[in-house]
Image: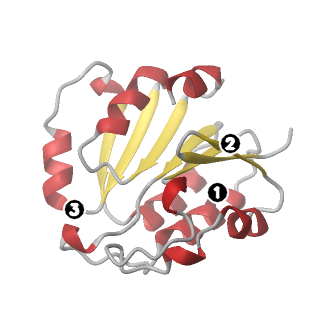
Amino acid sequence: MNEFLKSLQINIAVETGTNQAKTTRVLAQHFERVYSIELSETLFQTAESMTFPGRERVEFVLGDSADWVERLAREIEDSCFWYLDAHFCHITGHEATSDFPLWRELEAIKARDNRSDVIWIDDVHTFGKQRPDLGQPWEGVTVEAIEQFMPDCEAQVVGDGLVLRFPV
């Protein structure tokens, strides 16, 4: 993923699902501003107290990723790298306002005027499979379903991510 991120000419990243902040730390090395959204208050507090290179460029946000992506999609005017990995899991012990945030997140990004955005949807290896740990309709998440939902984007699998780019 590092090589992919180096190729982008984007200064802002939004990550959904902070969890242990592993991806956050990678993003902080490549972007001037990173927003990392976490639903679990415990995981949020742990991440917010971390120190790591680039930490000053990261804003940890507590809340539902679908709500925050909608908000940030309206507020961020520059091109953005969207790292979508908020697959709500029952282990967080929190209720999301969306049963399945991915489709709302993609809808909010699709509605933006900025067509230089790049979207990374993580965990391609689990696309189309039943995920009882998520309690979500994950088997409906396939490359084909996402391509149909985002018809203006070019889709490419990179590592364990599905990358969506709007044609320039």
Q: In which quarter of the image is residue 142?
A: bottom right
Identify the residue position indicated by label 1 in the image. Answer: 109
Task: Give the amino acid type for the residue marked by disc 2 in the picture.
Answer: Asp
Give the distance between the C-alpha atoms of the residues marked 3 and 2, in whole angstroms: 27 Å
Q: Where is residue 150 in the image (x, y as percent from the top left)?
A: 75, 62
Q: In which quarter of the image is residue 89?
A: bottom left
Q: Quadrant of the C terminus?
A: top right
Examine the rendered structure and indicate whether residue 25 appears above or below residue 20. Answer: above
Label 1 neighbour load within 10 Å: few <14, some 14-19, many 20+:
many
Question: How many numbered marks, from 0 up?
Answer: 3
| Labels 1 and 2: the sequence-earlier one | 1
Identify the residue position indicated by label 2 in the image. Answer: 117
Which residue is at 57% across, 44% downward?
A: 76
Label 2 neighbour load within 10 Å: few <14, some 14-19, many 20+:
many
Q: Are circles 1 and 2 on residues that touch, CB within 8 Å?
A: yes
Label 3 neighbour load within 10 Å: few <14, some 14-19, many 20+:
many
Q: Position of residue 77 (x, y in %)?
A: 63, 42
The front one of 83 and 108 is: 83
Which residue is at 43% across, 31% downward?
A: 27
Left or right: where does residue 147 sit relative to residue 58?
Answer: right
Q: Is mark 1 on a helix, strand or loop?
A: helix
Q: Where is residue 139 in the image (x, y as percent from the top left)?
A: 54, 76
Which residue is at 52% across, 45% downward?
A: 160
Examine the rendered structure and indicate whether residue 23 appears above or below residue 65. Answer: above
Give the distance between the C-alpha atoms of the residues marked 1 and 3, in whole angstroms: 23 Å
